[in-house]
Amino acid sequence: MSSKAIREFDAKLLLAYWLERSPSVSPSAKISPGFVYPAPHVAQISWDPETGAITPDSQLPPWVFTSKLVAKPDQLIKRRGKAGLLLLNKEWPEAKEWIAARAGKDVTVSSTTGKLSNFIVEPFLPHPSHTEYYVCINSVREGDNILFTHEGGIEVGDVDAKALKLLIPVGKEFPSRDAIKKALLTHVPEEKKDTLVDFLIRLYSVYVDLHFAYLEINPLICLDGVNGKPPTIHYLDMAAKLDQTADYLCGPKWAIARDLSVYDSRAQSNGIMADRGPPMVWPAPFGRDLTKEEAYIQKLDGSTGASLKLTVLNANGRIWTMVAGGGASVVYSDAIAAAGFAHELANYGEYSGAPTEGQTYEYAKTIIDLITRGAPRPDGKILIIGGGIANFTNVAATFKGIIRALKEYKAPLINHKVQIYIRRGGPNYQEGLKAMRLLGESLGVPIHVFGPETHITAIVPLALGLVKEAQQVTATIANGIHEDDGTGKGSIQGEVQVDEDQPVGPIGPSGERTQPNDKIVHFDFHASAKRPWFRPFDASTRSLVFGLQPRAIQGMLDFDYSCGRQTPSVAAMIYPFGGHHIQKFYWGTKETLLPVYTSTEEAVKKHPDADVVVNFASSRSVYQSTMEMLALPQIKAIAIIAEGVPERYAREILHLAEEKHVLIIGPATVGGIKPGCFRIGNSGGMMDNIIASKLYRPGSVGYVSKSGGMSNELNNILSLVTNGTYEGIAIGGDRYPGTTFIDHMLRYEADPECKMLVLLGEVGGIEEYRVIEAVKSGKITKPIVAWAIGTCAKMFTTEVQFGHAGSMANSDLETADAKNAAMKAAGFIVPDTFEELPTVLTETYRKLVKSGVIKVTAEREPPVIPMDYKWAQELGLIRKPAAFISTISDERGQELMYAGMRISDVFKEDIGIGGVVSLLWFKRRLPPYATKFIEMVLMLTADHGPAVSGAMNTIVATRAGKDLISSLASGLLTIGSRFGGALDEAAAMFSEAKDTGLTPREFVDQCRKKNKLISGIGHKIKSVNNPDLRVELVKEFVQKNFPTHTLLDYALAVEKVTTAKKDTLILNVDGCIAVCFVDLLRDSGAFSREEADEYIRIGTLNGLFVCGRSIGFIGHHLDQKRLRAPLYRHPADDIFINMQDMSQPRVLAKTA
C-alpha cells in the first residue's frame, strides 16, 4: 500500500519541524515577514502491555506539568469527541489519571472495538468558536485539492458539500495570493486573510515536500492579533496520510522531525539509527492491532522483493486462505463472502513476486500454525491454496516451501481435520500439483488439486460443500459456443503449419555441413507505416527495453516467433550502468544479436523504427528515466513495470504524457499483450501459457484489468469460451495508473477488429464510472462484460488493505457493489458473481457469432518454440553431469551449511575454529579434545620468527610494494619438503615403521643404512637438556586427553635412540604434531583405518601447517606495512659471485 495513515502525534511533529523549513512550493509563493509559526507543543503517552504502565513523567516535556491540557487517544480513531474520548482543560495529574484509567482497555467506537494504547497530550487552547476553521488537502488524479470552510470544529458537517475548493493541477503554476483568497477565504474576516494565506502556502509546501497524500486539520484556529501583531495560527485535531513508497526520498525528513531532542534537549536518544531520528511508524487501523504473526509476515515482507501479506480477520474462523497474487487474493475472498461464509473467513493475505522456497515456507508455516491452534472443531477446517495463472513464478518451486510446512504440521493438520483445496496455474504448475497430490497420499490429509482448466474460484463452493464438482471452464465450450458457428463441429479446427526447415543442414562441396543453428540471424528494418491512434501495437511494432532483462526479452522474442512476425519486436536494450555491448538471444532455433546502449536518447537515434519503451527501471530510478523518455518525440508508448513508484511522481508522469500524447501503461503492471503482434515484458506468462491461451494469434475480445495475474486468468477464460483475446492491458494496481479503463475502452471501441469488451475493475477509485458515462453518452456501443472485484470488503468489520495500493474504498461510490450495480444499470453485462463470469462471456460471444459480428476463422498451430536449457533443467526434463562436485558446504538454502551443520548451530554450540576445521576438512564432528588439539596446532605453527624462508619471502615481497595476497602467496610457496612439509613426511615415516613391526632401534638403523634423515627428528638449538617447550605442551596435552597415543610413544622411543648419539636429535615440534595427529586419526573412533591413512596421504597435516603459518605470514606483512619498510636489496658482500674467467664468449652455435 502506498498511502498510509500516521498518528496525529507524528503528523504534528512533521508540521512543527518542516512548516518553517520546507522549500517553497513555488518561487512566487511568498509569505509575510511577520508570520508566526505555531509552537511545537505535543507529547505522546504510550501504554506498555508488558508492564501495564504508561510513559513515565521523566520522559515528558516540562510544559506538560505547567499547562492546562487536552488528552485524547491517538490511534486513527474518528470523531473522538462524540465517542467520549476527549479530555479538556485539565492539569497533568487529572489527565494522567484519565489516561491510566483507559490505557490497555477495550473501547467500542462506531461498532469497532479496539484496545487503547497510545495517547496524545497538548496544551489546552481557549478560543471563541468563530475562530475555528477547517482545512483539508487531498490528492486526486488531476492534482491536489485544498478544501476550506470558515466553520470548523466538531459540528463541521458535510465538508464535501459546504467547503470551498481550490484544485492545484499537476504541473501547473501555484496560484497567487489573491487567487487563494478569492477561492477559499471569501467568508473570512479581512484582517485574517493574509495570515491564513501564509499558513496555507506553507502547509501546502510541506504537503508536497514530505509526500503527504492526505492532511486534514479540524479545527484550525486563527486567533486575533494582539497589540498590533498579526493573527496567530494553531491546529487542534489533525489526520494525515503519507505516501509510504516515498520513504527512500523522505525517510530522513520524516525521521528528523520525530527526533524529540530537536524540541527538548533533555529527551533521551534512541541510539544509533539510519537517520537522525526514529523511522516513521505506520500504525494499524483502530481495532486491528498487528498480531505477532502479522508483524512477523510484515517484517518478512519488508526484507524481500517479493510480496507477503497477512491479515487475521477471525482467528477462530474455519476457512483459511493462502493465495498467490494481489488480484486473485481478492476474488477468493469475494467468492467466500458471496457464498455466505464471510463470518468464517479467518484471514486475508497473498504471496506473489516469486518468493523463494524459504520465504514461502515461513509464510505457509505461519498460516498453518494459526490454523492448528485451539481446540479442534467437529466440522474441521478448510485451507484454500489458490491463485491465478502466474507470469514467471515457478509454481513447483514455491510449492516446495508449502510442502515443507505441511509435512512439519502433519499431526496437527490431521487432528484439526483440515481439508486442503488447491488451484494453480503458471510455469511448471503440473509438477507442483503432482507434488501436492502425492503429498496428500502420504500425509493422510485430504488434498484436492485443480489446474487452470478449473475456474479460478471454482474450488471455493466445492470446499464449502455447496457443490460436488468444481466448475470446469472447458465445459462451456461443449455447451454451446460453437454450436452456432455454422461449421457443425464441436470445436474450431485449423491446418497444422509444417516447418519446412531441414533439421540437418546441407553438405557443401568441401564436405562441410552447415547447421541452421550455426547462423546468427540478421534482420533488415524499415520504418513501419503510421498506426492509427487506437492501435499503438501491431505486428510491426518495435520497442526498446530499459534495463538488463534477458529473461523478459527472450520471452518477447519467443512470442514474436510464435506469432509469425518477420522481425523481433525488441530493437535494443538500454542499461546506463554498463558500457556499450551486444547480447545474444534466440530467434526460434537460431540466434540474433541485440545492442545495449547507455541512454535512451542514443538508442532512439540508432533505431528510428522503435517507438515503444518497456521500462524495467527500479521504483527509485523509474521517474527520471521515464521523464527522459517523454522528452523524445519518437516515443509513443511507455510501459512502466516497477512497483512502489511515489504517487506524486506517478501523477507527474501521467500528466506530462497526456500533454505529449504518449500512452503510459503502469506503474506496477506486468504490461499487456496484443495477440499475434506484440507482448510487453512478461505479460501472458511462459510460452506454454501463451500457446494454451492462443495468444499467438488475435481473437475478438479486448479487455482491461488492474491485475497482471488476473489478466492471465482472462486470457485463459477467453481462449476457452470465445475465440480469444484481441488485446489485453493490465493498467496496474496503483492509485494513479498512467492510463485508466476509459483510455483503453475508447481505443477498443474505435478499433474495428475488436468486437467485444471486458472490464475487470475492483474496489477503490472511480475510474469505472468514466466508462459508465461513456456508455451512457454513446461513446461506447460495443457490448461490455464487466465485474468489479472486492465485493467482500463490506463484510469486514475493520479496514483491510487489499493487494493493490488503489484497492480501498474511500466512499460508498468506490465500493465494488456500487460499481457493479452502476455498470449493470448502464447496460453493461454484469454477472451476479465472479464465478458466473465465464457463463456471461459465453452467452455474449454466442450472440455476436450468431449475429455475424464475429466471424469464426480456422485455427492454426503455432511453430514449436524450443525450451531454454536452464528452464528445462529447472523442470527436471533434462540432466547434465556436474562440472564440479562439492560435499562440504552449501550456501543455496536459507542458511549456510558446513557439512550439514547450520551456521547458526556452529555458533550456538560454540564448536570453535577446531570444530569448523573438522566439519570442512573431515565432514564430521570430532570430539572436543580433537578440536582443541587442532586449535593448539594452529597456535603452535602460527609463526617461527622472521628468519625462516617463508617469513623472509613474505617480508621481501611486502617491502617490494606487493599487496597482502601476493606477499602471503610468496611465503606459502616456500612450504615443501625442506620447510614445513616435514609434517606429512614424518607422519608417513613413523607410521610405516611402526606398522611394519620395526623396533625404534631397527627403524633408526634402517634409515642410517639408507642415508636418509628421519623427518621430525633433530633441532638446531633445542636438545635433551634444553627441550622445546612447544613439544612439551603437545606431549602433555595428548598424554592427558587422547584415549591412546601409541605412535607418540613409538616416536619418543625413537628419540631415546637418536639422542643417545647426539642430544640435539630430539623429537621436534613438526614430528611431535605429526605423530599425535596420526594418533588422533587412528584412535579417536571418528575414522576408519583406511580413512585415516588416506587423510595422511592427501596432505592434511601440511594443511594444518599452511593454515597456522598463514597467520604469522599475514602478521609479518602487516608489520612491514606499519613500519613503512623500504624495498629490500640484499647486500652484495653477502653473496659470493664466481664467474669463470674467459677471454672471449663461448660459441653456442655454428655461424653461417
Image: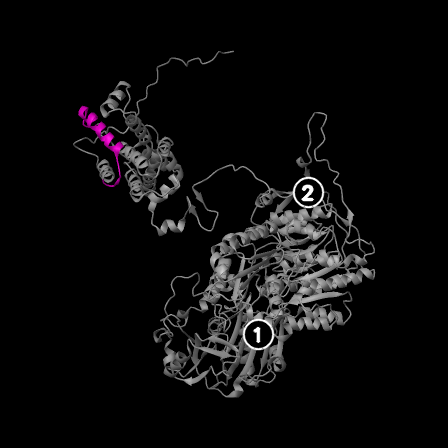
Q: Main secondary structure of the magenta part?
A: helix
Residue 464 visible, this angle: yes
Horizontal side of 422 relative to 755 (left or right) equals left
Along the viewing direction, whichever of 570 and 1025 lies nearer the viewer: 1025
Q: Which residues are magenta?
A: 1040-1064
Q: Is residue 514 above or below residue 812?
A: above
| Residue 187 horizontal/vertical position (percent) | 60, 85
Badge 1: few (under 14), some or many (20 or more) residues near its Cα, within 10 Å?
many
Q: Which residue is depicted at the point 37% across and 14% down?
A: 1142
Q: Which mark is residue 351?
A: none
Above or below — where is 562 with respect to 185?
A: above
The front one of 64 and 990 is 990
Question: What secondary structure is found at the residue carrying circle 1?
Answer: strand
Q: Nearer the viewer, residue 466 or 983?
A: 466
| Residue designated by label 1 | 137
Instruction: Give the Cα separation between the discs numbered 2 and 1.
Output: 55 Å
Is residue 684 inside the magenta stretch? no
Q: Position of residue 1109 (x, y in %)?
A: 32, 37
Closest to the camera, between mark 2 and mark 1, is: 2
Any part of residue 740 in sight: no
Residue picked out by circle 2 = 588
Q: Amino acid at mark 2?
A: Gly
- The amino acid sitting under disc 1 is Ile
Of all residues shown, which one is farthest toward the front? Answer: 378
Lateral position of residue 530 relative to residue 66, left or right:
right
Q: Position of residue 847 (x, y in %)?
A: 79, 63
Q: Secondary structure at mark 2?
A: loop
**Front residue of this view, candidates 728 and 1140:** 728
Residue 1062 among those drawn in magenta: yes
**Residue 970's quadrant in the figure?**
top left
Q: How many numbered marks appear?
A: 2
